[in-house]
Image: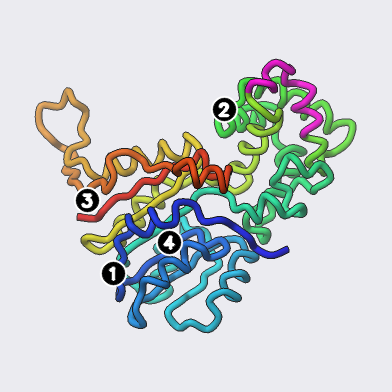
Amino acid sequence: MKFNHVSIMKEQCMELLNIRKDGIYVDCTAGGGGHSQAILDRLSQDGRLICIDKDTDALTACRERFGSDARVSLVHSDYKDFSSVINDLGIDKVDGILIDLGISSYQIDNYERGFSYMSVDAPLDMRMDRTQPLDAAFVLNNYTENQIADILRYYGEESFASAIAREIVKQRLVEPFKTCGQLVAVTDRIIPAAVKRKTGHSAKKTFQALRIEVNKELEGLDKALHDMIDRLKSGGRIVIITFHSLEDRIVKHCFADCQTDCICPPEFPVCVCNHRAVGKLVNKKPIVPDSEEIKVNSRSASAKLRALEKL
């Protein structure tokens, strides 16, 4: 299956990155290379692009796309290891960083990856990095009922988390979870028809929660963002696309912290934290896709775009 993915808000991302033609840029979630290509098109022969992705299928697609372009470095890694990646490449500071925190259309549509609740016979995988041992089936078959309920409640904001977790534990005693359809059958039984008519597919929130847990999407995100901002040159920018409230909240709070001088509690008479602002917001409010983009790519509907410039 070809790695197809529609890059969300591509032109807006390029505008916010404010690309310097001879600069060093990092696409932390390269995917099929759409955003990476747009960056590369704006670089001179003296520019440099580092493409990071933990999905080897994505890197294969980028390798085919960029060929032997000497300006491009492809790295199989998690963007949370950003500092180690650029250290290994002999780079101290960069001019711009782009992160698309969403799952790619290729991953959703590729049956064998097990990300979609529509692929009932697909294996319960959901790993972005298929070299890691933890997958969705392991979570469902080995986590405790309380652990599963907490994951569904926090990562999926699922109101029926406890009931779904209870049913999962009950069903795995009869037969271990192997396919997406087995999990969909559980959520269909638990969530009332009236709720499904209002909120959509019964498994939507459960699949989101499992995917976040399997890929540890929120774990260490705040620290990773601060590390990246620390490695930006003055005037460099970090541009981030988020897709759900949990990750967007982390990005928003990180950016707020980075543009604030003192973070002492308000009741302190004098500042003792010695915290100083390191950046400023490029866009005061998040940018969202326009109606035309949503019409072409419905998966872009929940996207929010934020950017911070290093002082």
Query: Which residue has dot 4 on it?
Result: 82
Residue drawn at point x = 72 percent, y = 55 percent:
110
Between disc 1 and disc 3, the foreground one is 1
Judging by the rendered image, the residue that carries numbered circle 3 is: 278
User: Looking at the image, which residue is at 61% across and 21% down?
Assistant: 159
User: What is the distance, in whole Å, between disc 2 and disc 1 at their CAs?
Assistant: 41 Å
Whether pointer 4 and pointer 3 mark residues with C-beta atoms closer than 8 Å, the reply is no
Front residue of 117/216: it is: 117
Residue 130 in which image quadrant: bottom right
| Mark 2 in CB contact with mark 3 (< 8 angstroms) | no
What is the CA distance from the residue labelled 2 to the residue labelled 4? 29 Å
Is the residue marked by circle 3 packed among few (<14), some (14-19), or many (20+) residues within 10 Å?
some
Image: 71 above or below 106: below
Residue 157: image tag: 2
For mark 3, give the secondary structure: loop
Query: Looking at numbered disc 4 in the image, what kind of residue is underneath it?
Result: Phe
